[in-house]
Amino acid sequence: MKFSLIYEAQTIDSSREGDRRIFDETVEQAVLADKLGFDTFWCVEHTALTNYSHMSAPETMLAFVAGKTERLGIGHGVVCLPPAMNHPVKVAERIATLDLLSKGRVHFGVGKGGTQQESGTFGYDLATLQPQIDEAMYLIPKMFVQDEIEHNGDFVKIPKRPIHPKPYQDPHPPMYLACTNTESLKNAGARGMGALVLGFGGPEEIAKKVAVYHEAWDNRDEKDQVGFRPNRHIAALCPAIVLDDNEKARQIGIRGQRYFMESLAYWYAGGERPDPEKWKDDTYIDGNGQAVIKSRFASEEVSVDFSDPTLAMMNPNHAYGTVNDCIGYVQRLIDAGADEILFICQMGTVPQWAQLETLKNIGEHVIPYFRKQNGLA
C-alpha cells in the first residue's frame, strides 16, 4: 500500500497575496510529508480555473519540491496533453529531466483536462481532444527509449530528431491515466496504465471502479500497451481532515469539501462562485438516515442522498475525524481494492494548521498502523 498526497493549489483568495500563501503552504506540507513517510506528492494541472485550482505549472512546483526533499515520490497527476498546451517533445524532455534530478522519483500521469474553460484557453474544443491525447500518450514513451524519434501523426508531426535527456528510471517512470468515468478506467486497464481515481464517491464507488479497471486489465491486448512499463495500480482519492476533535475535523472537512464542490461546479456547470462568508455553520444535514452536504449546485439548493453517482461529491463521509476514524475509512478503501491512498486536505476553506495537523496524524499514526499490519514497520 502507498500513502500519498494530492494538491490542486485550491484557494479562496485569488489575489497575488493568496497565490504566495497557497504555494508557500503547499511546499511546507511537502517537506513535512517527506519527513513523515508519505510515498508520493502529486500535483494536478489546471489552467484558468480561478479559486478551484491555481496549479497551472506543476512541473515547476514538482521540481522545486524534489530539490527540497529526499525520498518523496514526485507525481504528475496529470500532465495535460493537448499539443498546444504541452507539446509531446517538451513533455518528454521535462519528465526525463525531473526524473534525473530527483534520482528516479517521478510518477507520470496523463490526461486532457476537464473543462472547456481550460481547453478553450489553447484554442481547443474539449469534445474533440481525446484522439489528440491518445496520439501523444503513445508517442511520448517512445522518446524515452529511442535514440531518435520521427512521427507523422494526425495531430503532431516531428521530423527525425534525437530527444534528450533520457529518464533516470529504465525504461521510464510508471505511467498513469486520470480516471473520472467508466470509459477512462477501461482505457487505463486496457492500455496497461495505472488509474488515478479522482472522485468523492467513497469505498463502494471505488470497489465498482476497481472491478471495471481489473476486468479491462485482465482482457487487455499487449499491442494496446502505452509505454514500456505495465503498471497495474489503482490510486483512490481520500478527502481527509484528522484532528483530536472529531466534530471539529468533520466541520472543517465538510466545509472545505463544499468549497471544493462549489468552485468546481462554477467552472463545470455555471452558477455562482462559492462565498463561504455567506454560509451557515451547518453545511451538512441528515437525509434518509445519512449525512449529506446541503449546498448550492448550479444555482439550485440541493440536499441529496450521496448514493446518486452524479452528486457523489456531496458525500461527506470520508476520513474526517480522529486517527481511528481515518484508519477505519482507509481500511474500507483498501478493502475496496485501492493500491494507493491519495489524501487530499487542501480544500478551499481548510486552514493551514488543520492541514499540518492532519499530515502529522496520518504520518505518525495512520501510516505506521498499516505498515505494521503488512509487516513493514
Image (cartoon, helix red, strand yellow):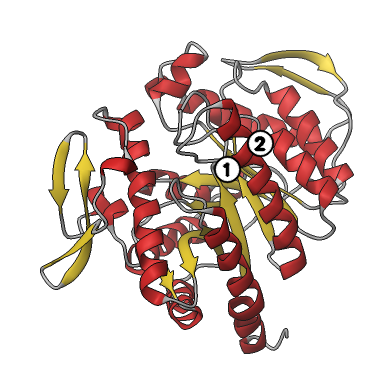
Image point (49%, 39%), residue name: 11
Query: Is residue 215 toward the left or the right of residue 233 in the image?
Result: left
Name the residue tied to disc 1. Answer: 224
- Counting residues from the N terminus, which is met first, the one under dot 2 or under dot 1? 2
Q: Decide which of 333, 146 is in the foreground and name it.
A: 333
Is label 1 in a helix, a strand or a loop?
A: helix
Front label number (2 vs 1): 2
- Tag of residue 58: 2
Is label 2 in a helix, a strand or a loop?
A: helix
Q: Is residue 289 above or below residue 340?
A: below
Q: Quadrant of residue 141?
A: top right
Residue 95: x and y, percent? 76, 37
Image point (53%, 61%), residue name: 354
Q: Quadrant of the C terminus?
A: bottom right
Residue 302: x and y, percent? 15, 48
Q: Is residue 316 above or below residue 14?
A: below
Numbered circles on residues, count: 2
Q: Decide which of 317, 170 is in the foreground and name it.
A: 317
Local packing at callout 2 (Cα closer than 10 Å; few below 14, some 14-19, many 20+) is many
Q: Is residue 210 above or below residue 126?
A: below
Q: Quadrant of the N terminus?
A: bottom right
Residue 109: x and y, percent? 62, 43
Query: What amino acid does circle 1 point to?
Result: Asp
Image point (74%, 14%), residue name: 158
Furthest residue to the left? 288
Query: What amino acid does circle 2 point to?
Result: Pro
Distance from label 2 to label 1 (Cα)? Answer: 28 Å
- Whether residue 194 can be seen here: no
